Image: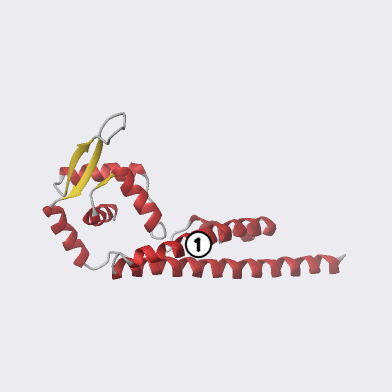
Amino acid sequence: MIKYAILGLLHYKDMHGYRIKEHIERNFGHMWSINYGQIYPNLKKLHEDGLIAMKEVVANGEKGPPRKLYSITETGKKVFQKWLHAAPEKPMLLRDPFLMRFVFFGFGDADRAIETIDGQIKRYEKELERRVKNLARWEKSGLYVRLIADLGVNLNQMILDWLTHARQEILKEIEMDNKARRAAK
């Protein structure tokens, strides 16, 4: 998937590896996460396969080695088009390490579960604010980019709603357990 994300981004403009990673994290973070250990080997392979070109560029006033600027080749565009028109490999999945932890909260302290949920709520509120602020910018990038940005906002809001609901349900359970303990005394 990273291979095609890189090829797709290079349709917009030539980019350095750092910029590609930054763009994926900032704009596609709701779909997947990525690290440098994935970016640079993929860039090397894409270059070896002739799907992207690379040139070294020295920025004005910068010290150190030249940066590698990548651009998509005609072969890369053909491979990308073939992938673009193929059937999706897998259905959309929601992968979040928090959800794996959440499912086991019943084995831990409910107050600690609430603290963790509160942290997630703050995180998603901040992310929603950023996504809504950027929505106007994405509207200028074309229909499909705008629709993906809209999906990010809607997913973010849905998760926030669910977290708030889960928090309320856990608090009710805590209250019921406290009442039962008081009644047993």
Q: Residue at x 30, y 29 (%)?
A: 64
The image shows residue 109 at horizontal and vertical percentages of: 68, 56
Q: Residue lying at the far top in this picture: please name it.
A: 64
Q: Quadrant of the N terminus?
A: bottom left
Local secondary structure at mark 1: helix
Q: What colouring method underlies this structural image?
A: secondary structure
Quarter of the image for residue 161 reads bottom right
The image shows residue 131 at horizontal and vertical percentages of: 44, 62
Between 157 and 62, the one nearer to me in the picture? 62
Between 26 and 163, the one nearer to me in the picture? 26
- Drawn side of residue 72 relative to residue 134, left or right: left
Residue that carries the numbered disc 1 in the rendered image: 129
- Drawn side of residue 77 relative to residue 91, left or right: left
The answer to whether residue 175 shows anywhere in this view is: yes
Type of amino acid at the residue the image marks with label 1:
Glu
| Label 1, residues with CA under 10 Å away: few <14, some 14-19, many ≥20 | few
Q: Residue at x 48, y 65 (%)?
A: 156
- Drawn side of residue 165 relative to residue 14, left or right: right
Q: Quadrant of the C terminus?
A: bottom right
Q: Residue at x 66, y 55 (%)?
A: 112
Between 56 and 94, the one nearer to me in the picture? 56
The image shows residue 48 at horizontal and vertical percentages of: 16, 42
Q: Residue at x 84, y 66 (%)?
A: 182
